[in-house]
Amino acid sequence: MKKTVLVTGGAGFIGSHLCRFLLDKGFRVVCVDNFLTGSGRNITEFKGNSDFVFINHDVTKPIEIPEPVHYVLHFASPASPFDYAAFPIQTLKVGSLGTHNMLGLAKVKKAVFLLASTSEVYGDPLVHPQPESYWGNVNPIGPRGVYDEAKRFAEALTMAYHRVHKTDTKIARIFNTYGECMRKNDGRVVPAFITQALSGKPLTVFGDGSQTRSFCYVTDLVEGIYRLMLSKASEPINLGNPDEYTVLEFAGKILKLTGSGSKITFKPLPVDDPKTRCPDISKAKKLLNWQPKVSVDAGLKRTIEWFRHN
């Protein structure tokens, strides 16, 4: 019998790539999404696949799945600053009520539960690069707090189920990820810079551009998620690419790869915007035998081509 994986947020950017990967691996996939920030276009290609089931549902409300489920991958959540600014209460609810419902489902089904957490649990870090042992520097009442604290609560709840109910749980702390199927207007730096460059508009750099980011191509991330799903690890594990760039350097890279003549314009730094963001992936290397393989230039070329034609 094929094993079944339930993916919440499966019509989102990372979720849809995950659905494709799992179908290719021979799993049956149940995709749950309410299209708050996901898109039906991301899952159209799976509709004729007998191993793919789509359920339009808000995971903050309880759900029953009338078949065996072996893995629950909880990826539902607004994930960009634009999104959680627009949907702050929904972001908190999916991190709390949604996580509770999906943990409950995993408990009933005796399934493995994997939480898509985030590097944002580290806030504006005072430690660099960020290891999983770092507790973070988060402003709980700032505009970014709704996302940061939703994920921190989700991690705490996941570990509570692990300790109290002995649920087999995994926590992936996902760092900046990019690739095909990102929304052009989601506010994150990769789609923002690419769409601005391709349309000849100025690239918007916040602050002086000295803040750093690291970028992981989505196929690398999905491979890491899969290895974590099958692993014995229960503690949080960073998944990301430790190659680090200043935002200004990254803007220059986008201009070069697109051949754009766009200029760079500067705007004030948003409140609580992290000054550095770079994963320590020692644990992922040791426990999952995983590290990114796709170079930033190679991943960006693929992503730029996708944006040119979509």
Image: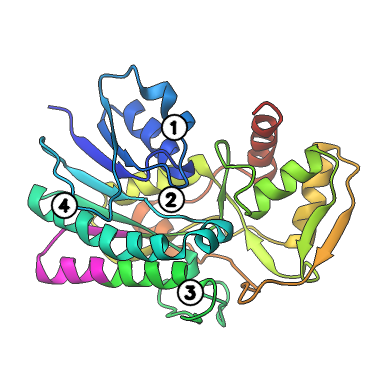
Reading the image, the residue beneath label 1 is: 40
- List x then y, in percent, for residue 120: 49, 68
For the residues bearing labels 4 and 2, Cβ distance under 8 angstroms: no
Under mark 3, the amino acid is Gly
Labels 3 and 1: the sequence-earlier one: 1
Under mark 4, the amino acid is Ala
Tell me how far mark 3 sits from mark 2, CA to CA: 30 Å
Reading the image, the residue beneath label 3 is: 145
> Which quadrant of the view contains residue 169?
bottom left
Tell me how far mark 4 sits from mark 1, CA to CA: 25 Å
Labels 1 and 2: the sequence-earlier one: 1
For the residues bearing labels 3 and 1, Cβ distance under 8 angstroms: no
- List x then y, in percent, for residue 118: 45, 62
Badge nearest the viewer, 4 or 2: 4
- Write the start and end of the magenta stretch as one range: 157-171
In-front residue for pair 308/220: 308
From what the image shows, is residue 14 above or below residue 77?
A: above
Reading the image, the residue beneath label 2 is: 290
Residue at 49% x, 56% y is 79
**Secondary structure under badge 4?**
helix
User: Was residue 170 drawn as part of the magenta stretch in this picture?
Assistant: yes
Reading the image, the residue beneath label 4 is: 106
Labels 3 and 2: the sequence-earlier one: 3
Badge nearest the viewer, 1 or 2: 1
Badge nearest the viewer, 3 or 4: 3
